[in-house]
Amino acid sequence: MKRIHAVTLLTCLAVLLAATLLTGYWTRAPESRTVRVGFIYSEDESTPYTANFVQAQRMLAEEYGDRIEIISRSNVLSRGSERPLQELIREGCNIIFVNMDTDTPVTAARENPEVTFCQVSLPDVSIEGTPENYHTFNGEIYQARYVSGIVAGCKLREMIDSGELDARDALVGFVAANGTAEVISGYTAFLLGVRSVAPEAVMRVRTTGSWSNYSAEKDAAKQLIDEGCVIIAQHVNTAGSAVACEEAVSEGKRVYHVGYHQSMMDVAPSCALVSIRTNWAPYMIQAVGAVLNGKAVEESVSANAHGRDMSAGFESGWVELLDLNEFLEAEGTRSRVSQAVEDLKKGRIQVFSGDYTGVHPRNAADTIDLKDGYTENQFSSNPSFNYILKDYIIVEN
């Protein structure tokens, strides 16, 4: 009897031990972990640029619910970014997203190897030599720029064919923040999209010297309209150029607008043709999922990897067209857009190609012949095409 009692006791102890181990295992399982997610924003939700990020932040919250806690800091200046970044670290953030131009996250990553840092890629911050917990990402926005150019080109084609616009006056304008490769790549892709439908088109570019200056952007758009531009696009952060176009229409002028970061239908309903944006949500959701499940970011994100730098376009939902205006679009626009998006997804279009010569803006001896083509985002998520198309793009500072 004593032997039976002893066996019974040992069996109970084994069952209890197994239950304890299993309970401990499930307690430690990655999916039960709560992750704190931090955001550093250069502006606030009043600007389309940051509003687009906040939209992705909300989608992240919807995806994970109470499995994550979100803490954010807005209106952070580059030179003052260290303090809010350190605050997020002290508050226990496991992963921090940064949408601004600053090298502070690289230093913070070295000092805090337990925290994952994800920053929108910058031309002067290379992934090489950075710590393993530092990552960069960006959408291949040239694809959306090209397709929005097709929308604008269809409108120009309609105006020319109907006799409303002389082919010699097929002039488009672009309000640009500066003369960096990111901006040049964007407006070049836009014009190439326009010219794929309306080869008569040429483009004037006005730079504001700032990513976010409402009045300067509005003034630049007004100047382009006064110079005869009938379509205005933008690579700046506010809706200033869209408002300028709407006011011009109210004054009886003929002009249309192509927006960036968010739909401009609310501020420019009479002239907004289409808008484009980078969709930051896929990267954020998958990167946070990696932290939740104890995996490397690049193992969890579906995109084109350049080391710890990631990019993607239409094929992964990282870039989008917003609100193609059914009341203003030219006939046949949607079928052209659908075909172009599908071709870009399949890699059947090389955007930067054709009978064009590009000249480097700071070295006239440095040129490129686009007959040979140029593959954007081949080696980095940050745009790299940095040539002005001779005879077709005029930059006005």
Image (cartoon, helix red, strand yellow):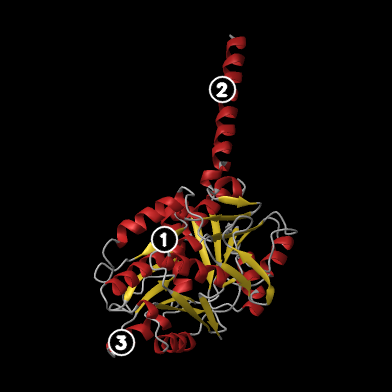
Where is residue 346? Give x, y as percent. Answer: 46, 47
- Count neighbours of disc 2 (C-alpha within 10 A) and say few if under 14, some if 14 to 19, many if 20 or more: few
Between 12 and 74, the residue placed more toward the observer is: 74
Q: Could you tell me which secondary element the residue under label 2 belongs to? A: helix
Q: What residue sits right under mark 2 in the picture?
A: 12
**Relative to 20, is 306 above or below?**
below
Q: Residue at x 50, y 85 (%)?
A: 213
Q: Could you tell me which secondary element the residue under label 3 belongs to? A: loop
* Residue sitting at the far right: 129
Dot 3 or dot 2, earlier in sequence: 2
Where is residue 24? Give x, y as percent. Answer: 58, 38
- The answer to whether residue 313 is left or right of residue 375 is left
Where is residue 152? Give x, y as percent. Answer: 37, 70
The quadrant where residue 163 appears:
bottom left
The CA distance from mark 1 to mark 2 is: 60 Å
Between 350 and 170, the residue placed more toward the observer is: 170
Q: What residue sits right under mark 3 in the picture?
A: 253
Q: What residue sits right under mark 1 in the picture?
A: 320
The CA distance from mark 3 to mark 2 is: 87 Å
Between 159 and 33, the residue placed more toward the observer is: 159
1 and 2 marks in contact (CB < 8 Å): no
- The answer to whether residue 291 is left or right of residue 149 is right
- Count neighbours of disc 3 (C-alpha within 10 A) and say few if under 14, some if 14 to 19, many if 20 or more: some
**Relative to 75, is 247 above or below?**
below
- Camera-side mark, 1 or 2: 1
Where is residue 363? Give x, y as percent. Answer: 69, 75
* Amino acid type, callout 3: Lys
Dot 1 or dot 2, earlier in sequence: 2
Dot 1 or dot 3, earlier in sequence: 3
